[in-house]
Image (tube, helix red, strand yellow):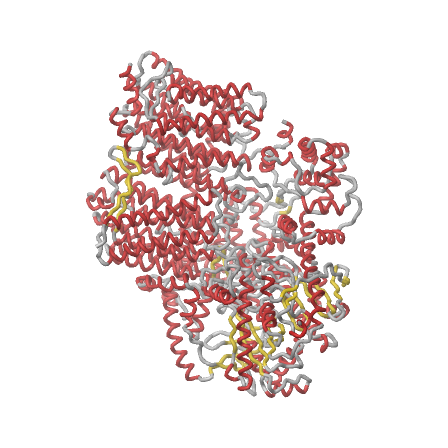
């Protein structure tokens, strides 16, 4: 199998899908087209994981490369987006929303696969632009403003990368690095930059809102530039303190919320803050494990978001200060919600736990930081159980309308759950974490796995 | 006498069996197989009797000195660089005792519940959670690494909270399940911090390495662990969750809060005893917490007028005594006490719905009324002190209110932040009327017309 | 002058509190549990009116849900004939005036009953319309005319959408009228979303529990003899609650009340004024405050009414004390919740908004399509939807459920009455041989099967049924028990005390010594286990209890055998005869005088019609039930004994009837008991079907053989009885052999984990007052109370009158308590018993802190069929009407239709059903009745409710051949 071709397909498929969807005459059929395309892609992506390993080659002008990192995040992204597309519901999936949705996916793929920081920034900027335009159209200005800010930061940083012919992350000026990290924070919803994203969620909670708070570019910026920034101790200390305060605060905010979207949003952002905190740290395997952590957040965050979305689709704005008792109507959703939620909070037996435990034990944290990080985890767990109890338990207020999950919805949530549990119980099935592969990466580069790929690429040139 | 390979294999099997049953149950539920009560009961019966057999074998052989404590390595979950998450289990007398208790009591309670929960809507859920609980306890009993202990600890916490909230239709149990979980999560911070700190400072979380730790590290790590053990053991000030936990069905109250779950706390301390030997202050802390808890629970328990709460407080009082023993360094007495108390309290709680029946029997035997109790308190204390003490005891030392105040304080801060955040976002959205909490109900005609 | 008005005001408050007692549950302490009509205080209204009023007051269900009835409709439990008959009676046949042409009002109601869908509106309805296929197809239950009309009008989806749009825009969404706010709590909950009750209830529960404790806690509350009000004030004024700011002002208030010596009634007036509740709302305030947590105050009332039933001597329990304290605490909590703002608890004229639970648009739409309303018709003529709305109001959900219930009951009524009408001629032609033994049991529905099986085994047995206290209303003190318990119907307060005495006092003294040593040990262990030091020492050896625990849980029957140790105790006698000058103990006369005995025996034998043809053996069986893990154990005991075990009553009756002096006196009034006849008292445990006989050593030699034979047959009968009972237990396999079935029920009794030791009165539906002769051999499925009555010896209906006055209320109490506990297990019943927690030895709570749960637990009622009790009385309508005139309590039950009655004349084979218009002749629908040989052939392999059948094996052989 030609890797080049497959990667090209992976990027081109959603793009083609977007065109087909835009031109397709019958509205009802649109989502089936989308699903078919995404299924193909995800199968291919997942096939990669098991069959091929890393590739050292650059492909084409976009400087795409297949690294273990892309192999973890790629399938997670596809799986997550597939789930969201499937959960869209009759009215939404029949609309033209999917054009936008597929275009975004295509751009995100480029961002994941590319090795060139300049192209990463451009892709990231483009996706932000797409998101922002859509949000403005929906009348959700606050997140739009935040995205424009991000685009501005990216634009200003871009020249620094075009000046050099070959990108060396370590040569990057610190101020640029810092700016990029803050741009990443903007997307991640790190407190107090979470306002925009939160407003998006709480104003209209649907798949679009979910996609806009499950950032790909933001995490990429963080993971790629984080270690560089981290070498500058003065800045990184400030960032670390910021994150250490933000993470438990976000998790605690999730407990205080009254509406489901906001509670979900804060849980998600808290896990992002943890990711940022741990990914900024240096260590031989960190970037690799951070990739897995990110994949885990992506899977469980999408899953929990989709589950929350399905609930609000059926039951509207749920008051989390009261018990709603949905268990009777959707018992399956109750179980899936609980598992996905606990996965997001890093409970044992899930993919997230494995990565989290690794990062916690190897990151060089002092006592205070440890306590804060652990508190965050603990609070997230509580927030999730609170959401679950308040939603599904208690005397059911609804008596007549029976709203069971539909087949496609069960399938997509179950697939995500399965992936998370498999990753957690048999983590060696995820290539990155298996010791062999990790050692292979270590052998290639003493510093960072991603750079390992770049080094190899350089050697070829 | 018995080959080590055999023992290791048997231990591995014992640990794997509940996991297997859980898997079968999960697959059965999710693919809609016809899981009758009888089948579930059989599945659990086979699993637990095998477990009990092997646990008895381990316990007796270790007790009689036929075999030495041994370890088994079931592989590595992940390993990278200096870090590895090894599935290493170790069995010594203490662990074997707890393993035996787990198997025996869960087995009996499992048999009890088959009739008790017959035709209840949560039958499968109960057994599923019971299995998760067994796995958690097994891991705690035999884990050699503290990382693993944490996994078991978490399983215990989650299954407990879900079982307290077993009667999902009613608000009370669910609210109380959440409260108990909050107490667990707060103290879990201690346990996890302890593990992470230990890993940083000594690069291993193996229990066998605890004895080699220097005393300052021991103080810090040990402090975390003591805090971590307080929640599950309902040590003051975490006691209020325990009476609340009596919301679950009787068997789960018996097995969790009368017996195994609450005793996991002194068990953890016993496991970590080498660490506490490193620093006297730790033992003093444990003793102090133990004695306060014993006094608190004994005083409050005296005025409880319902059977389950009085049993709950009686149980905590004895857990406090165990902490005291551990603080004094009498580990063996503490272990022996744990062993006996776990069994007797389970038995008492299982009989609790029959209290009227038993009271009649007792009266018939005695031929006269029961001796009045609590008279010495009335004789010794002056009336005003008596009233005060009675009130404080009946109100459970206002510990609930203490937690309400703490939680209320944090909540008010969070709500203020939330309000500011929402103001800011509504400013950006340029909504003049402020953030809209409740949206007006829209008519549905529009949807159709489209 | 002012002083006087003040006084009259407090008197008024006292009256109000007394009046509010009727909203509180009337359940007694668990030990003395006795079935009663949950809505006893509504009996002056008609059944429908009463349950609907109570439903509003308590927020409960008046009838089963419509969905449940539709399920019964689908399964065939309710037939089309039943529904049509009910509709014919209740709904007129005039044309509807809108919708599908040719549809009458009756058809329309039928369509609504079968097909009207409801929705809770809001988002879930949104989802239903946008995501599900609701509008693209018609519901199943559409009447054909409507279906055709709508289908002809255009494509399904567009028609339904058009109809929906019209209903959506035109439905009446006007808000419900407001309600005046009476309790500050309701107002605060509405305005601030804070519930002061969440603060108040835990506090009150703890203190009520402490105050009413019947011997559970180690350190009882002090100063209880001051009364709840004063004692609580003293405790409130003690220092303490720094951590609970909201109760701080309560201390000062309590202090000032103590100092000014304000009475409870005055305190209520003051508190209401402080809350801002106007005087005219005072009674409503008291009622609503009581209803917020009715169980505990209900217990105050019960303990005051019958202090002798408390598990331990109780302090004064005045309801007014509770109300005063409740309002004090309520005020403090409310003040805390509003403290930050104005401090006004209840602004004048405060109104509570009421919200609609259901979506009116959807109901309108659903009804419109069921009745075949076309969109253009509705659009053209706005009157159509208006008419439809009125029609929906006339036949609202509650009204339709009432109709459903009627149909449901009618089906059962016809099944039974037809069965009896077809069966009677068959047995009337038979000549039953002279009985070799006569067995008298309680009228209890659980004894029906025992009697039937015994008659099937051998036609030489004759059985009778009568209220199981056998006329001996007494306090009874068994050997070794320090207390005496009443054994008589709940509304009777006995005046006599009967004690069990050892035959050989020396033997007893020895035994009692060893018992009390055992008791001492047990007491110390059970009390000591929960204390700190003794508990620590005991628990060091606690591991040894793994052995009893394992035995009890894994082999309950074995454990039961071991623990009872085979020792049956020592021979005893009842101290039945009063001393020449009667001795009084606790105010009760010890023993009966001979005259009293003669009265009791004569009257009772007359009641059951056993005044001649005595068999050589007459066995009286009292009954009761013993089980583990069952706080409601007493609910399974004999209802006629006030929730006690009727063994001693049967024993006492037999002793009286065996006395020569009694017999001689009886002979004078025409009841000649032959010398060879011997009476034996016995006790039937309905849980494990064991039968115990008393005073066997007194049986004359020549009767012993006969007794042994009878005992053998009774043993066989109880095996078969157990077998028949087992078919109802889901956990007993259907193919059990009778012997194994007996073991199964024995296991159940000893099983600590068994929440359903027996089903008690569950499934009761019928009561027959009349001769056994005409219903002998009819399978009635353990659902019937059988009272023997012989009209031949009752010329002036005096016997019938006293029987009905006894049986009517008892039967109504049992059946209605089951009805309500089934229909609303949360409000009227005590829901699932699994989390029940015995508190103070007198009630159960859910978990650690809740209101006292009253009513029956779900496990007791789960297979019940909610119906009113159908009474079949062997009498003529005129006779019954006369009796009703003389018995106002009974009349209220019958005329208000809390029970249904049928008059039956077996000789002529005629029946009259007491309808809303009075007695109307009953016409049989079916003239067929299945015939089987034995009961087992009919019920074998089936778990559900069974229709009657004739069983021939008990018939005399001559006729069979």
Q: Is residue C810 above or below residue C396?
A: below
Would you say C760 lies left or right of B70 here?
Answer: right
Toward which corner of the image does residue C728 lie, by quadrant? bottom right
Q: Quadrant of the N terminus of chain A?
A: top left
Would you say C654 lies left or right of A299 here?
Answer: right
Q: Is residue B383 above or below residue C569?
A: above
Q: Residue furthest right?
A: C94
Instruction: Please tell me which residue is depicted at 64% across the width and 30% down the height of the picture.
Output: B448
Percent across and percent down for residue A369 are 31, 35
Toward which corner of the image does residue B243 lie, by quadrant? bottom left
Comparing B127 with A372, the one in front is B127
Q: Quadrant of the C terminus of chain A?
A: top left
Q: Is residue C433 above or below residue A266?
A: below
Residue C551 is at least partly visible in this image: yes
Comparing C197 with C122, the one in front is C122
Residue C315 is at least partly visible in this image: no
Percent across and percent down for residue B222 are 26, 45
Q: How many marks?
A: 0
Instruction: Please tell me which residue is depicted at 33% across the width and 51% down the height of the picture.
Output: B264
Comparing B277 with C402, the one in front is C402
Percent across and percent down for residue B2 are 23, 53
Would you say C703 lies left or right of B110 here?
Answer: right
Toward which corner of the image does residue C552 lie, by quadrant? bottom left
Percent across and percent down for residue C247 are 47, 52
């Amino acid at each position: 199998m030609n890797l080049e071709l497959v990667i090209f397909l992976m990027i081109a498929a959603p793009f083609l899908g977007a065109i087909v969807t835009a031109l397709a005459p019958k509205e009802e059929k649109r989502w089936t087209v989308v699903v078919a395309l995404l299924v193909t892609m995800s199968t291919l992506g997942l096939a990669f994981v098991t069959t091929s390993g890393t590739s050292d080659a650059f492909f084409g002008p976009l400087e795409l490369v297949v690294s273990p990192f892309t192999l973890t995040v790629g399938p997670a992204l596809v799986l997550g987006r597939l789930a969201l597309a499937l959960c869209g519901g009759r009215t939404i999936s029949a609309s033209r929303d999917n054009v936008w949705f597929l275009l975004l996916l295509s751009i995100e793929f480029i961002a994941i696969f590319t090795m060139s920081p300049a192209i990463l920034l451009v892709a990231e900027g483009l996706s932000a632009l797409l998101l922002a335009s859509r949000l403005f159209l929906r009348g959700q200005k606050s997140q739009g403003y935040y995205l424009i800010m991000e685009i501005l930061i990216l634009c200003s940083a871009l020249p620094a990368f075009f000046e050099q012919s070959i990108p060396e992350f370590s040569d990057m000026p610190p101020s640029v690095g810092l700016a990029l990290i803050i741009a990443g924070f903007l997307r991640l919803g790190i407190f107090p930059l979470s306002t925009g994203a939160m407003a998006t969620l709480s104003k209209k909670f649907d798949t679009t809102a979910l996609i806009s708070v499950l950032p790909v570019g933001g995490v990429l910026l963080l993971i790629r530039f984080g270690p560089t920034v981290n070498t500058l101790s003065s800045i990184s200390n400030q960032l670390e303190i910021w994150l250490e305060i933000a993470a438990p605060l976000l998790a605690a905010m999730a407990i205080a919320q009254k509406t489901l979207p906001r509670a979900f949003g804060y849980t998600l952002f808290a896990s992002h803050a943890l990711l940022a905190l741990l990914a900024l740290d240096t260590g031989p395997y960190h970037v690799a494990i951070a990739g897995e952590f990110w994949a885990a957040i992506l899977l469980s965050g999408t899953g929990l978001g989709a589950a929350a979305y399905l609930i609000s689709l059926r039951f509207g704005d749920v008051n989390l200060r009261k018990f709603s008792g949905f268990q009777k109507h959707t018992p399956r959703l109750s179980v899936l919600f609980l598992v996905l939620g606990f996965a997001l909070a890093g409970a044992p037996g899930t993919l997230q736990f494995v990565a989290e435990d690794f990062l916690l034990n190897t990151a060089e944290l002092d006592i205070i930081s440890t306590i804060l990080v652990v508190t965050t985890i603990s609070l997230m767990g509580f927030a999730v159980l609170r959401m679950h109890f308040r939603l599904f338990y208690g005397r059911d207020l609804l008596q007549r309308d029976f709203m069971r999950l539909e087949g496609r919805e069960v399938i997509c949530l179950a697939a995500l759950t399965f992936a998370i549990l498999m990753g957690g119980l048999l983590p060696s099935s995820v290539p990155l974490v298996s010791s062999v592969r990790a050692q292979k990466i270590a052998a290639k580069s003493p510093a960072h796995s991603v750079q390992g790929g770049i080094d190899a690429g350089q050697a070829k040139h | 006498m018995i080959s080590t390979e055999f023992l290791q294999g048997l231990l591995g099997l014992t640990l794997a069996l509940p996991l297997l049953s859980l898997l079968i149950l999960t697959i059965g539920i999710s693919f809609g197989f016809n899981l009758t009560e009888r089948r579930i009961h059989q599945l659990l019966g086979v699993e637990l009797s095998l477990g009990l057999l092997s646990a008895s074998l381990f316990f007796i052989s270790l007790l009689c000195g036929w075999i030495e404590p041994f370890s088994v390595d079931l592989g590595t979950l992940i390993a990278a660089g200096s870090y590895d998450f090894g599935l290493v289990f170790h069995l010594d007398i203490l662990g074997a005792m707890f393993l035996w208790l787990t198997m025996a009591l869960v087995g009996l309670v499992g048999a009890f519940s088959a009739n008790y929960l017959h035709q209840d809507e949560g039958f499968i859920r109960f057994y599923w959670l019971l299995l998760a609980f067994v796995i958690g306890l097994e891991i705690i009993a035999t884990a050699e690494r503290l990382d693993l202990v944490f996994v078991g600890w978490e399983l215990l916490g989650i299954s407990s909270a879900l079982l307290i909230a077993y009667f999902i239709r009613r608000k009370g149990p669910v609210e109380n399940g959440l409260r108990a979980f909050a107490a667990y999560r707060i103290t879990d911070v201690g346990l996890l911090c302890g593990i992470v700190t230990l890993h940083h400072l000594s690069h291993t979380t193996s229990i066998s390495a605890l004895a080699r730790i220097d005393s300052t590290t021991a103080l810090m790590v040990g402090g975390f662990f003591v805090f971590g053990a307080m929640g599950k053991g309902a040590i003051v000030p975490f006691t209020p969750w325990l009476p609340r936990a009596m919301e679950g069905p009787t068997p789960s109250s018996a097995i969790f809060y009368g017996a195994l779950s609450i005793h996991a706390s002194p068990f953890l301390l016993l496991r970590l005893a080498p660490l506490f030997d490193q620093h006297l202050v730790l033992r003093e802390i444990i003793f102090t917490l133990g004695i306060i808890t014993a006094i608190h629970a004994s005083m409050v328990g005296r005025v409880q007028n319902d059977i389950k709460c009085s049993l709950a407080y009686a149980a905590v009082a004895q857990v406090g005594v165990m902490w005291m023993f551990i603080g004094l360094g009498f580990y063996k007495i503490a272990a022996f006490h744990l062993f006996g108390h776990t069994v007797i309290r389970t038995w008492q709680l299982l009989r609790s719905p029959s209290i009227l029946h038993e009271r009649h029997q007792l009266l018939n035997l005695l031929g006269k009324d029961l001796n009045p109790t609590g008279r010495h308190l009335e004789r010794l204390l002056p009336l005003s002190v008596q009233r005060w003490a009675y009130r404080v005891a009946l109100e459970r030392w206002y510990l609930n209110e203490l937690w309400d105040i703490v939680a209320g304080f944090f909540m008010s801060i969070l709500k203020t932040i939330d309000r500011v955040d929402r103001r800011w976002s509504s400013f950006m959205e340029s909504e003049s009327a402020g953030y809209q909490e409740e949206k007006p109900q829209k008519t549905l005609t529009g949807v159709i017309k489209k | 002058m002012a002083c006087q008005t003040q006084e009259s005001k407090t008197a008024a408050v006292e009256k109000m509190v007394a009046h509010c007692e009727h909203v509180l549950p009337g359940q007694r302490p668990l030990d003395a549990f006795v079935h009663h009509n949950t809505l006893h205080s509504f009996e002056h209204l008609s059944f429908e009116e009463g349950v609907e009023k109570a439903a509003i007051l308590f927020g409960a269900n008046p009838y089963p849900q419509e969905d449940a009835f539709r399920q019964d409709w689908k399964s065939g439990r309710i037939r089309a004939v039943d529904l049509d008959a009910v509709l014919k009676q209740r709904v007129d046949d005039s044309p509807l005036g809108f919708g599908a042409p040719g549809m009458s009002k009756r058809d329309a109601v039928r369509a609504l009953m079968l097909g009207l869908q409801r929705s809770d509106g809001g988002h879930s309805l949104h989802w239903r319309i946008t995501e599900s296929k609701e509008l693209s197809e018609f519901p199943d239950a559409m009447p054909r005319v409507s279906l055709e009309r709508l289908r002809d009008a255009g494509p399904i989806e567009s028609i339904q959408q058009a109809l929906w749009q019209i209903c959506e825009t035109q439905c009446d969404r006007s808000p419900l009228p407001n309600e005046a706010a009476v309790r500050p709590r309701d107002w605060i909950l509405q305005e601030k979303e804070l519930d002061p009750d969440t603060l108040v209830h835990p506090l009150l529960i703890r203190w009520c529990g402490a105050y009413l404790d019947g011997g559970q806690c180690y350190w009882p509350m002090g100063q209880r003899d001051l009364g709840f009000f004063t004692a609580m004030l003293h405790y409130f004024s003690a220092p303490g609650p720094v951590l609970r700011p909201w109760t701080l002002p309560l201390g000062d208030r309590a202090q000032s009340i103590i100092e000014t010596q304000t009475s409870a009634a005055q305190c209520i007036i003051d508190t209401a004024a402080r809350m801002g509740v106007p005087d005219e709302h005072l009674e409503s305030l008291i009622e609503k405050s009581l209803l917020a947590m009715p169980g505990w105050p209900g217990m105050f009332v019960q303990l005051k009414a019958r202090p002798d039933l408390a598990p331990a001597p109780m302090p004064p329990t005045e309801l007014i004390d509770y109300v005063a304290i409740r309002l004090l605490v309520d005020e403090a909590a409310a003040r805390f919740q509003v403290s930050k703002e104005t401090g006004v608890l209840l602004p004048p004229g405060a109104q509570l908004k009421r919200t609609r639970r259901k979506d009116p648009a959807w109901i309108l739409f659903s009804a419109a399509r069921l009745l075949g309303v076309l969109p253009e018709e509705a659009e053209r003529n706005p009157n159509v939807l208006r008419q439809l709305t009125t029609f929906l109001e006339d036949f609202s959900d509650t009204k339709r459920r009432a109709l459903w219930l009627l149909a449901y009951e009618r089906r059962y009524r016809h099944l039974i009455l037809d069965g009896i009408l077809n069966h009677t001629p068959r047995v009337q032609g038979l000549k039953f041989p002279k009985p070799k033994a006569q067995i008298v049991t309680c009228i209890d529905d659980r004894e029906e099967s025992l009697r039937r099986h015994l008659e099937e085994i051998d036609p030489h047995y004759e059985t009778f049924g009568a209220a199981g206290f056998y006329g001996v209303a007494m306090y009874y003190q068994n050997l070794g028990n320090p207390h005496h318990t009443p054994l008589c119907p709940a509304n009777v307060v006995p005046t006599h005390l009967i004690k069990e005495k050892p035959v050989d006092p020396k033997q007893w003294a020895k035994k009692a010594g060893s018992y009390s040593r055992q008791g001492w040990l047990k007491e110390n262990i059970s009390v000591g286990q929960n204390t700190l030091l003794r508990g620590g020492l005991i628990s060091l050896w606690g591991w040894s209890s793994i052995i009893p625990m394992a035995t009890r849980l894994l082999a309950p029957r074995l454990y039961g055998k071991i623990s009872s140790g085979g020792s049956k105790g020592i021979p005893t006698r009842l101290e039945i005869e009063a001393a020449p000058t009667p001795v009084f103990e606790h105010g009760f006369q010890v023993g009966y005088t001979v005259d009293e005995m003669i009265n009791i025996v004569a009257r009772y034998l007359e009641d059951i019609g056993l005044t001649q043809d005595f068999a050589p053996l007459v066995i009286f069986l009292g009954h009761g039930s013993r089980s583990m893990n069952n706080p409601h154990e007493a609910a399974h005991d004999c209802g006629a004994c006030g929730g006690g075990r009727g063994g001693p009553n049967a024993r006492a009756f037999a002793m009286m009837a065996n006395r020569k002096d009694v017999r001689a006196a009886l002979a004078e009034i025409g009841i000649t008991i032959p010398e060879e006849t011997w009476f034996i008292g016995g006790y039937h445990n309905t849980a494990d079907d064991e039968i115990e006989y008393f005073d066997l050593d007194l049986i004359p030699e020549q009767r012993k053989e006969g007794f042994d034979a009878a005992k053998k047959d009774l043993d066989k009968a109880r095996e078969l009885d157990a077998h028949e009972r087992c078919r109802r237990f889901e956990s007993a396999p259907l193919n059990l052999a009778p012997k194994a079935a007996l073991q199964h029920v024995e296991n159940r009794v000893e099983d600590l984990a068994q929440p359903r030791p027996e089903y008690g009165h569950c499934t009761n539906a019928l009561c027959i007052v009349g001769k056994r002769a005409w219903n002998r051999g009819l399978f009635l499925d353990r659902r019937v109370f059988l009272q023997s009555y012989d009209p031949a010896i009752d010329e002036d209906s005096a016997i019938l009158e006293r029987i009905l006055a006894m049986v009517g209320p008892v039967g109504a109490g049992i059946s209605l308590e089951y009805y309500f506990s089934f229909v609303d297990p949360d409000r009227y019943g005590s829901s699932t018993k699994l989390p029940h927690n015995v508190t103070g030895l007198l009630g159960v709570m859910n978990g650690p802190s809740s209101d006292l749960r009253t009513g029956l637990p779900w496990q007791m009622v789960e297979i019940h069929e909610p119906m009113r009790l159908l009474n079949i009385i062997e009498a003529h309508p005129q006779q019954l009407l006369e009796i009703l005139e003389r018995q106002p309590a009974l009349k209220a039950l019958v005329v208000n239709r809390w029970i249904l009655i049928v008059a039956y004349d077996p000789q002529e084979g005629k029946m009259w059903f007491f309808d809303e218009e009075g007695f109307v002749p009953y016409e049989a629908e079916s003239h067929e009745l299945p015939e089987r040989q034995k009961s087992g052939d009919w019920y074998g392999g089936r778990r559900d409710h069974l229709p009657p059948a004739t069983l021939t094996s008990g018939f005399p052989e001559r006729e069979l051949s």
